[in-house]
Amino acid sequence: MMNTSSSNLETRPSLLQELRSFEKGGFFDFGHPLLNRIAESFLKAAGIGAIQAVSRETYFTATEGLDSRGGGIPPEISGNKKHRFPDLRGENNTKSLEAMVKHTGKESLQWGLAAGVYSGLTYGLTEARGAHDWKNSAVAGAITGVALALTSEGSSHEQIVQGAITGAAISTAANLLSGIF
Protein backbone atom coordinates (compact mmCIF):
# COMPACT_ATOMS: atom_id res chain seq x y z
CA MET A 1 0.00 0.00 0.00
CA MET A 2 1.20 3.46 -0.87
CA ASN A 3 1.83 6.14 1.72
CA THR A 4 -0.88 8.74 1.07
CA SER A 5 -0.21 10.92 4.09
CA SER A 6 2.37 13.01 2.25
CA SER A 7 0.04 13.60 -0.71
CA ASN A 8 -2.68 14.96 1.62
CA LEU A 9 -0.48 17.71 2.99
CA GLU A 10 -1.25 21.21 1.84
CA THR A 11 1.47 23.18 0.19
CA ARG A 12 2.02 26.36 2.17
CA PRO A 13 3.75 29.39 0.71
CA SER A 14 7.16 30.30 2.06
CA LEU A 15 7.74 33.44 4.08
CA LEU A 16 9.38 35.08 1.08
CA GLN A 17 6.32 34.32 -1.07
CA GLU A 18 4.06 35.79 1.64
CA LEU A 19 6.09 39.00 1.75
CA ARG A 20 6.07 39.31 -2.04
CA SER A 21 2.29 39.01 -2.06
CA PHE A 22 2.08 42.27 -0.06
CA GLU A 23 3.56 44.15 -3.01
CA LYS A 24 0.62 43.10 -5.16
CA GLY A 25 -2.33 43.34 -2.83
CA GLY A 26 -1.19 45.29 0.19
CA PHE A 27 -1.67 44.65 3.87
CA PHE A 28 -5.37 45.45 4.06
CA ASP A 29 -8.53 45.13 2.07
CA PHE A 30 -11.22 47.35 3.54
CA GLY A 31 -13.25 47.32 0.36
CA HIS A 32 -12.31 50.78 -0.88
CA PRO A 33 -8.97 51.91 -2.35
CA LEU A 34 -8.96 55.12 -0.29
CA LEU A 35 -9.26 53.26 3.02
CA ASN A 36 -6.67 50.69 1.94
CA ARG A 37 -4.22 53.41 0.94
CA ILE A 38 -4.66 55.38 4.18
CA ALA A 39 -4.25 52.29 6.36
CA GLU A 40 -1.17 51.05 4.50
CA SER A 41 0.48 54.48 4.54
CA PHE A 42 -0.25 54.86 8.24
CA LEU A 43 1.19 51.46 9.10
CA LYS A 44 4.36 51.88 7.05
CA ALA A 45 5.10 55.40 8.27
CA ALA A 46 4.35 54.53 11.89
CA GLY A 47 6.97 51.79 11.73
CA ILE A 48 9.48 54.21 10.26
CA GLY A 49 8.64 56.76 12.96
CA ALA A 50 9.23 54.22 15.71
CA ILE A 51 12.60 53.20 14.28
CA GLN A 52 13.61 56.84 13.87
CA ALA A 53 12.60 57.74 17.45
CA VAL A 54 14.48 54.83 19.00
CA SER A 55 17.59 55.36 16.88
CA ARG A 56 17.67 59.09 17.70
CA GLU A 57 17.44 58.39 21.43
CA THR A 58 20.14 55.73 21.13
CA TYR A 59 22.39 58.23 19.43
CA PHE A 60 21.82 60.88 22.11
CA THR A 61 22.39 58.36 24.89
CA ALA A 62 25.63 57.16 23.29
CA THR A 63 26.98 60.67 22.69
CA GLU A 64 26.04 61.70 26.22
CA GLY A 65 28.00 58.73 27.54
CA LEU A 66 31.04 59.72 25.50
CA ASP A 67 30.79 63.34 26.66
CA SER A 68 30.55 62.35 30.32
CA ARG A 69 33.82 60.37 30.06
CA GLY A 70 35.66 63.39 28.72
CA GLY A 71 36.29 61.99 25.26
CA GLY A 72 34.33 61.53 22.13
CA ILE A 73 32.45 64.20 20.27
CA PRO A 74 33.81 67.77 20.30
CA PRO A 75 31.39 70.36 21.74
CA GLU A 76 31.24 72.36 18.50
CA ILE A 77 29.72 69.32 16.80
CA SER A 78 27.50 67.99 19.57
CA GLY A 79 26.31 71.37 20.90
CA ASN A 80 23.79 71.49 23.70
CA LYS A 81 21.20 69.20 22.16
CA LYS A 82 18.25 68.18 24.26
CA HIS A 83 16.85 64.71 24.31
CA ARG A 84 13.54 64.44 22.52
CA PHE A 85 12.51 62.19 25.42
CA PRO A 86 13.45 64.33 28.46
CA ASP A 87 11.93 61.99 31.06
CA LEU A 88 13.76 58.96 29.71
CA ARG A 89 16.21 59.23 32.59
CA GLY A 90 13.85 57.58 35.05
CA GLU A 91 14.56 56.42 38.56
CA ASN A 92 15.14 52.93 37.25
CA ASN A 93 15.26 51.02 33.99
CA THR A 94 11.55 50.20 34.12
CA LYS A 95 10.57 53.88 34.19
CA SER A 96 13.04 54.65 31.40
CA LEU A 97 11.60 51.84 29.28
CA GLU A 98 8.06 53.06 29.94
CA ALA A 99 9.03 56.57 28.87
CA MET A 100 10.72 55.23 25.72
CA VAL A 101 7.66 53.18 24.75
CA LYS A 102 5.32 56.12 25.43
CA HIS A 103 7.31 58.60 23.38
CA THR A 104 8.03 56.13 20.59
CA GLY A 105 4.32 55.40 20.33
CA LYS A 106 3.52 59.11 20.16
CA GLU A 107 6.09 59.70 17.45
CA SER A 108 4.85 56.66 15.50
CA LEU A 109 1.33 58.01 15.68
CA GLN A 110 2.49 61.40 14.35
CA TRP A 111 4.35 59.82 11.42
CA GLY A 112 1.39 57.55 10.66
CA LEU A 113 -1.05 60.46 10.87
CA ALA A 114 1.04 62.49 8.43
CA ALA A 115 1.32 59.65 5.94
CA GLY A 116 -2.35 58.68 6.21
CA VAL A 117 -3.60 62.26 5.83
CA TYR A 118 -1.28 63.00 2.92
CA SER A 119 -2.00 59.74 1.10
CA GLY A 120 -5.76 60.04 1.59
CA LEU A 121 -5.82 63.65 0.45
CA THR A 122 -3.75 63.05 -2.68
CA TYR A 123 -5.95 60.09 -3.61
CA GLY A 124 -9.17 62.02 -2.93
CA LEU A 125 -8.03 65.11 -4.80
CA THR A 126 -6.88 63.02 -7.75
CA GLU A 127 -10.25 61.29 -7.90
CA ALA A 128 -12.19 64.56 -7.51
CA ARG A 129 -10.18 66.61 -9.99
CA GLY A 130 -9.33 63.81 -12.40
CA ALA A 131 -5.64 64.73 -12.45
CA HIS A 132 -2.59 64.14 -10.30
CA ASP A 133 -0.53 67.32 -10.44
CA TRP A 134 1.39 69.76 -8.28
CA LYS A 135 -1.82 71.47 -7.14
CA ASN A 136 -3.04 68.30 -5.44
CA SER A 137 0.38 67.86 -3.84
CA ALA A 138 0.45 71.46 -2.58
CA VAL A 139 -2.99 71.24 -0.95
CA ALA A 140 -2.33 67.79 0.55
CA GLY A 141 1.08 68.90 1.83
CA ALA A 142 -0.31 72.07 3.40
CA ILE A 143 -3.11 70.24 5.21
CA THR A 144 -0.70 67.54 6.35
CA GLY A 145 1.70 70.20 7.64
CA VAL A 146 -1.12 71.79 9.64
CA ALA A 147 -2.10 68.39 11.08
CA LEU A 148 1.48 67.73 12.16
CA ALA A 149 1.82 71.20 13.71
CA LEU A 150 -1.37 70.68 15.67
CA THR A 151 -0.10 67.39 17.14
CA SER A 152 3.12 68.93 18.46
CA GLU A 153 3.25 70.18 22.03
CA GLY A 154 2.51 73.88 22.52
CA SER A 155 1.78 74.63 18.87
CA SER A 156 1.43 78.31 18.11
CA HIS A 157 -0.14 80.17 15.19
CA GLU A 158 3.30 80.65 13.66
CA GLN A 159 4.12 76.95 13.87
CA ILE A 160 0.85 76.03 12.18
CA VAL A 161 1.45 78.48 9.32
CA GLN A 162 5.05 77.32 9.00
CA GLY A 163 3.88 73.67 8.90
CA ALA A 164 1.41 74.45 6.12
CA ILE A 165 3.99 76.32 4.04
CA THR A 166 6.70 73.71 4.59
CA GLY A 167 4.36 70.81 3.84
CA ALA A 168 3.10 72.44 0.64
CA ALA A 169 6.61 73.33 -0.51
CA ILE A 170 8.11 69.88 0.11
CA SER A 171 5.17 68.07 -1.42
CA THR A 172 5.08 70.29 -4.50
CA ALA A 173 8.83 69.99 -5.02
CA ALA A 174 8.64 66.20 -4.70
CA ASN A 175 5.82 66.09 -7.24
CA LEU A 176 7.63 68.33 -9.73
CA LEU A 177 10.95 66.53 -9.34
CA SER A 178 9.41 63.05 -9.62
CA GLY A 179 9.19 63.44 -13.39
CA ILE A 180 12.86 64.42 -13.68
CA PHE A 181 14.45 61.56 -11.77
Image: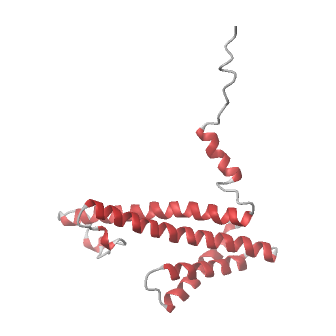
Taking the image as shown, residue 49 lies to the left or right of residue 3, namely left
Taking the image as shown, residue 179 lies to the left or right of residue 62, namely right
Q: Is residue 133 above or below residue 108?
A: below
* Residue that extends furthest to the left in the rendered view of this protein: 70
For the image shown, how many numbered marks are present on the structure? 0
* Residue that extends furthest to the bottom in the rendered view of this protein: 157
Image point 33% across, 61% down: which residue?
97
Q: Position of residue 141 (x, y in %)?
A: 62, 78
Taking the image as shown, residue 138 lies to the left or right of residue 163, namely right
Q: Position of residue 156 (x, y in %)?
A: 47, 90
> Quadrant of residue 79 in the image?
bottom left
Image point 66% across, 56% down: which residue?
28
* Residue that extends furthest to the right in the rendered view of this protein: 130
In-front residue for pair 7/20: 7
> Quadrant of residue 32 in the image?
bottom right
Q: Position of residue 57 (x, y in %)?
A: 36, 65
In-front residue for pair 17/168: 17
Image point 43% across, 81% down: which residue?
153
Which quarter of the rendered picture does the C terminus lie within?
Answer: bottom right
Which quarter of the rendered picture does the N terminus lie within?
Answer: top right
How has the structure been colored for display?
Answer: secondary structure
> Quadrant of residue 72 in the image?
bottom left
In-front residue for pair 66/26: 26
Q: Position of residue 43 (x, y in %)?
A: 57, 61
Image point 67% across, 51% down: which residue?
23
In-front residue for pair 99/26: 99
